[in-house]
Amino acid sequence: MNLIQEAQHAYLNRVTRRHFLKSAGAGLGAIAFSALGADTVRASGATMADGPHFAPKAKRVIFLHMAGGPSPLELFDYKPELARLDGQDCPESLLEGKRFAFIRGIPKMLGPQATFQQYGESGAWMSNHLPHMANVVDQIAFLKAMHTDEFNHAPAQLLVHSGSPRLGRPSMGSWVTYGLGSENENLPAFVVLLSGGAAPDAGASVYGSGFLPTVYQGVQCRTKGDPVLFLSDPDGIPRHLRRRSIDAINAINRQHHEEVGDPEILTRISQYEMAFRMQTSVPEAMDISHEPEYIHQMYGTEPGETAFSNNCLLARRLVERGVRFVQLFHWGWDSHGAGESEALNGGFLKRCQETDQPVTALIQDLDQRGLLEDTLVIWGGEFGRTPMLENRTGSDNPYVGRDHHSDVYTMWMAGGGVQGGITHGQTDEIGYSAVNGRVHVHDLQATILHLLGFDHRRLTYPFQGRDFRLTDVHGHVVHEILS
Amino acid sequence: MRVTPIGFVFALALLSWGCTRTPEISFNQQVRPILNERCVDCHGGIRRQGDLSLLFRHEALEAGESGKKAIVPFNVDESELLRRVSHADPAHRMPKDDLPLSEEDIQILHAWIEQGAMWEDHWAYVAPVRPEVPEVSDPDWIREPMDAFVLARLDQMGLVPQSEAECPVLIRRVTLDLTGLPPQPSDVQSVCQGGGSYEAYVDSLLSSPSYGERWASMWLDLARYADSKGYEKDIGRTIWHYRDWVIRALNDDMPFDQFTIEQLAGDLLPDPTENQLIATAFHRNTMTNTEGGTDDEEFRVAAVIDRVNTTWEVWQGTTFACVQCHGHPYDPFVHQEYYEFFAFFNSTTDRDLDNEYPTLAQFEDDVAADGHALIQEIQMIEDAIIARVETDTLTAQRRIWETTLDQPEVIGRVQLMQQNEVKRIVATPEENRGDGQQWMLNYVYASVNDDPILNRLREEKITKERALQALNPIQTPIMQDLPFQRRTHVFERGSFLLKGDPVHPGTPDALPSLSEDAPRNRLGMAQWLVSGENPLTARVVVNRFWEQLFGTGIVESLEDFGTQGLERSHPDLLDYLAVSFQEEHQWKIKSLLRSIVRSSTYRQSSHVTDPLLEMDPHNRFLARGPRFRLTAEQIRDQALHVSGLLSSTMYGPSVMPPQPDGLWKNPYDNRTWQVSDDDDRYRRAIYTYWRRTIPYPSMATFDSPSREFCVSRRIRTNTPLQALVTLNDPVFVEAATALAHRMMESDDPITAGYIYAMGIAPNQNELEVLNSLYLDALSHYSQSTLEANMIAEERGSPHLDAMTVVASAILNLDQFLMKS
């Protein structure tokens, strides 16, 4: 089946589905609003932002967080000079005044553990570890001089996602759903998908709602077990009986509302209706088994697995259904070289293999569906890696790796109002410092909000006597990469 | 947009504008809102553009960069501020690049300067004085003095209170409020029909052990209590003794001043008891970062900062965290004062170590003597180690060692997470190091020197420590001071690497000062918080209890009593409660709560009409009783209670009731959730294992915080995910099944089930709806095959299956999930 045939097939399905949803929502439709979105919150008395400040270029976001800090020197940032210096002592001038997580004393330089070639019309450099991505470089804007303030995982991940290295601030997905609400009344507006064998280092706070109401929290959807916790009816309760019991609950609640007058009861009635609909719509969205074979081949997906590839395909399915913010975390990029699983010549290669094809497929698939133009795809970790070899034990070790590095690293964006085929920012000849085009994490956040139609200085929430925002008191939009 | 009664007062002021004499301008009510809203962003504690700050009078009266004075009291012509805000040319007009001030605002500023431009202290920084109890329209309604303050406000607004709630509704309300559990149907009956008195029933609730469990939940959010250390690995922490201490202290009605002092400084009391040491775990609930490659000093400082911010939020309702990086943007606190307060907390011995040092070890009785002996021996060995390091010989060796630290094999022997701090210390000439730095360096040096005596001492210490661990002590992290004060500096821009001027422990100038003879340590600080002069503590505390009972605080922003906090709904009531809490109630929480729940205000029905809803949607003015959703803990406890499953076991290590598989996936940590057996599955929520990065899912869904940091207010939400929990979470399914069993024991099972849940019989309509649900379910289970109806454990009992469906519906009714 090709895309055209699939579209026709999907169209027929959708007509039926829409008909079903309409009829299921009838009666309570007037008060059954978006899942975990704007109206839910309004009804419960909480605040919501007033919508975008100007016309957005992107309507939704897929953020592919490569947790652990992938090394740009083995992926995108080609440094032939570093190869020449391989094995030499690091000059002391590079170490003065720097703090590292693990490097102490004088480390050796480590040449790129990859070969590079230029691709596409833009001539972007790409390493041999990402053969698929070489095909989509003309759709990507590389930010090669990203920098952050933190060199430990948990604080650095918090900074990327909440604008602060300490806990308590809302995550980017929460801010965005607070600002824009949901486009699908049967799915959460902010969905989180995890892979790589572990959760993000900073825990659920990286998709938490901080001081915003918990309706803006990211909802973790899973590919094993219930896709959303407690979504399935208990054994022995068939759908029609669940429908019956919700009808009974809501009938009594409606009557009670007439007696006591509390509007909160009406909200609850609508939430029970929504819960009932989610029980159908979430498993439907999360089930990739009916995707056509060519799509599975494109992403390299196997239904039923917990894998990054499946999550990429799910991300496409979710944004297609109007989910506002899809946050993926793929753990395991922390390539110190202290053991096989965390070495540039070990686990790192596996991570490349797991992600290269699905990331490429995601861009191509969004593109062929016309979704890429208003879907912003972001790829990156929480910091970069040193051009020096980290040799923690000082002993002979078949594995090589690099330490955490906060001064410079690469992220990229594609789609939703971003120019393709460009590179912004440049590093020095060894990839240790930025030469130009530095972009701080807060600048990245300001840019993402800008693409979504927000002035990052004006998307605020009053808390503890002042207006808080994602970018704290910082952030400049990177206009150079906007289309 | 924030709507406060300020607008109301302001409108009154405008109405009287036509009078010939300019009315007296109120700085707090009229001027400060203008300054805060329009001026202090640029001319305040953070940015002093043109060298002008409008935070303090003395600053505002000084000449700015231009040489002109912004404000000259009594002289409107000389006051540059007035000239600039009314300037015709936008290039010169203030606020810069913004809309001009309204004509009214300019007139207010004009009149205020004309009257002398007096500053007023913000109300919260002036100690409360007992207000006069106001005259009201209906004296018969007054049960407690607080009622008069509420009714006086309603009289002003032309509102009348609701009638008293129906007895069973009131009994359910007060029982949930005071114990976190619903009443037994027999209790409802004996008070409502058996002639029992409400007052006596309230007293029985206050003396029930469940009381402490319910109120501990509120306190543990403030204390950020959890069973894990936080951050990446988020490994387990043994600190449940502290949770138990809180429950006991509340049940014993420990006066709040003592409750404060023991938690903040129990270790500094003369001959502290073990309980007083456990109490200090309050501030050991800070997170410990065990991620590889972290800088221990960085996270020690982060913990101290958290202690400062938490203390200010909990006791002073002040956003002191703002002052960490710069002067407070709105409130009268300067940057240096943050670090003076920080200095109170900066001399403790904990330093982000994985082993949570220092801890209090507690033993089973039979090994307690051995244990305490071992602890003493270990202490003696540690003293001997430090004494050895401080000998001339080793000091000389250390000085040489310091010069060789850039060699990988030398620095490599220092524990990784201490290497950065060691480098920072040796970069400071020895004579300039603080005691804390030298102590730390000696400590580290003792672990790397190969001196034979040190080697022997270290080995002995390890042997003793192993012997100690073999006795399985419970080791609770506690506070402990160094024998000297660690040197504290201002951190420029809040960074611990940028040390500014040194400071000494102290309290901010905007508040009453520490008494002359008070010790300059945590104990002196704690006593200062609960001294009669402190204007904030009692107000902040009574406001918290008020919010728990009525759903909204008298100051809605529980965490912010500053000038940007939300305006008080009943200023005099707040002061009345704060004064009486200290005087009549002698800081006793039970006594305070007793008087509130006895009041007519509290006893009102929560029914609301549309016009009233429009006038007062959030019930700030209390023309009706409270109605809002139960807390996460109450939702769970109530379901288990009405189904007869709830365990009454108190205290002890946290337990793991069922949660879905596969949620615990922290990096570098392979612990799993081990579902507790038997009785422990059904313990009250307060005993549920609290892992910060992966909170217990059903509780998180009902808005419980992660406890990674102090939270004053849980924002209540109403979401479909909550419906999924109470409909489908196996814990709630099990409760429904158990409730169905109980129901089946009655001749009138549906009515019985409803009474178990609500304490009151269903009305005719409710009964019909539930009965019809029952019949439909019964017909399904009677017809379907055995395999299809396994929700109840007894195979082939369609009645029980169908009753379970009804029980589950009852547990999902709005009335059940709400307090009303």
Image (cartoon, helix red, strand yellow):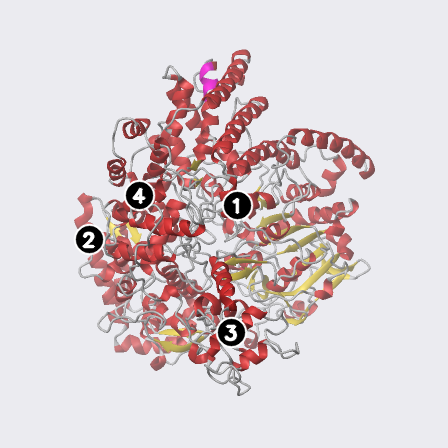
Circle 3/circle 1 CB separation < 8 Å: no
Q: Where is B89 relative to A199, above or below?
A: below
Q: Are marks 2 and 1 on the same chain?
A: yes
Tell me the residue that label 4 is attached to.
B140
Residue type, label 4? Asp
Mark 2 vs 1, N-terminal side: 2
Q: Earlier in the sequence, mark 1 or mark 4?
A: 4
Mark nearer the N terminus (3 vs 2): 3
Q: Please tell me which residue lies in front, A44 or B438.
A: A44
Q: Which mark is residue B109?
A: 3
Q: Measure how far apart labels 3 and 1 are at the Cα level.
A: 34 Å
Q: Position of residue B678 (x, y in %)?
A: 35, 30
- Alpha-carbon span between mark 3 and mark 2: 68 Å
Q: Amino acid at mark 3?
A: Leu
Would you say the residues marked 4 and 3 are in contact, meaning their CB atoms lie under 8 Å apart? no
Closer to the eye: label 3 or 2: 3
Callout 2 secondary element: helix
Q: Are marks 4 and 3 on the same chain?
A: yes
